[in-house]
């Protein structure tokens, strides 16, 4: 069982449409990070959300951290082909006497021109 | 500083051979992480260094895997007696606080 569940696993939409992807957990996180990964490359950090209810905007991307700090969403407005990639969420969790960065399995996003 | 650098980018090896990968982190980052990623999955933690000290090692990491970070700068990850199940992307990341900077990874294919 994934500690961070991302949905949908796969999304293919037309350029110009809006979309939202989700990152959910039953655990409380002190923060959550969102990364985008392109094929053959490492993940690139997009944003870190820290405060429950926090909303952060990065151009056409809007990130929200749930009030209870158990979930987060990423909304993309007017998607463009350059937004194509694997979107990963990750967050620190205290497990086995250490903080570990827990990763979701990602949402694979394809934006068709 | 050009970010986190990993070499080689691709490695094809025969089963049973040893392979070594190198990671050069961002110079001021004292934390260095190795991850493994297979297709359709998020990164899987392998090991973590703070400066030259290896502070954590995943229980999933068999004794065929070893990592070093001499002098707290670059790091190497060695896999001995490779198996086909070792085929994956091996990612290195460095950080100071939260938020990692990843390298482009080393794609390992064991044939």
Image: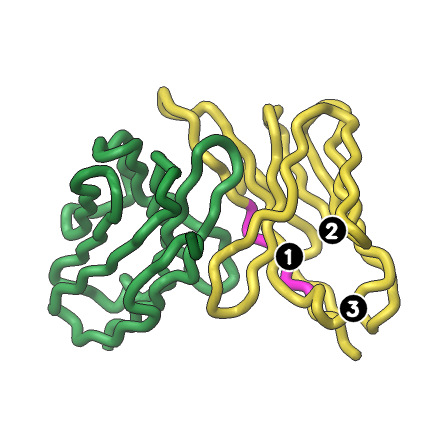
Chain colours: A yellow, B green
Q: Which residue is mark 3?
A: A80
Q: Which mark is residue A107?
A: 1
x, y percent for residue A109 = 68, 64
In this view, the residue in front, A79 or B17, is A79
In this view, the residue in front, A44 or A109, is A44
Discs 3 and 2 lie in a common subunit: yes
Would you say the residues marked 3 and 2 are in contact, meaning their CB atoms lie under 8 Å apart? Answer: no
Mark 3: secondary structure: loop
Q: Taking the image as drawn, is residue A5 in sight?
A: no
Magenta highlight range: A104-109
Would you say the residues marked 1 and 3 are in contact, meaning their CB atoms lie under 8 Å apart? Answer: no
Would you say the residues marked 1 and 2 are in contact, meaning their CB atoms lie under 8 Å apart? Answer: yes
In this view, the residue in front, B93 or A102, is B93
Mark 2: secondary structure: strand
Mark 1 vs mark 3, CA separation in Å? 16 Å
Mark 1 vs mark 2, CA separation in Å? 7 Å
């Amino acid at each position: 069982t994934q500690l961070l569940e991302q949905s949908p696993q796969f999304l293919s939409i037309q350029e110009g449409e809006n979309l939202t992807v989700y990152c959910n957990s039953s655990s409380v996180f002190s923060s959550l990070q969102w990364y985008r990964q392109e094929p053959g490359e490492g993940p690139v950090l997009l944003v870190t959300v820290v405060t429950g209810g926090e909303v952060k905007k990065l151009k056409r991307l809007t990130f929200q951290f749930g009030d209870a700090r158990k979930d987060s969403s990423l909304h993309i407005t007017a998607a463009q082909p350059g937004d194509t990639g694997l979107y990963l969420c990750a967050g620190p969790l205290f497990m086995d006497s250490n903080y570990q960065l827990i990763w979701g399995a990602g949402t694979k996003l394809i934006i068709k021109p | 500083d050009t970010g986190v650098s990993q070499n080689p980018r691709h490695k094809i090896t025969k089963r049973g051979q040893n392979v070594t990968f190198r990671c050069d982190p961002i110079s001021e980052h004292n934390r260095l992480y190795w991850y493994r990623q297979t297709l359709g999955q998020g990164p899987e933690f392998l090991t973590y260094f703070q400066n030259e000290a290896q502070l954590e090692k995943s229980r999933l990491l068999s004794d065929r895997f070893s990592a070093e970070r001499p002098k707290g700068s670059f790091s190497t990850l060695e896999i001995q007696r490779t198996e086909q199940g070792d085929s994956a992307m091996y990612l290195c990341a460095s950080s100071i606080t939260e938020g990692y900077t990843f390298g482009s990874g080393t794609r390992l294919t064991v044939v």
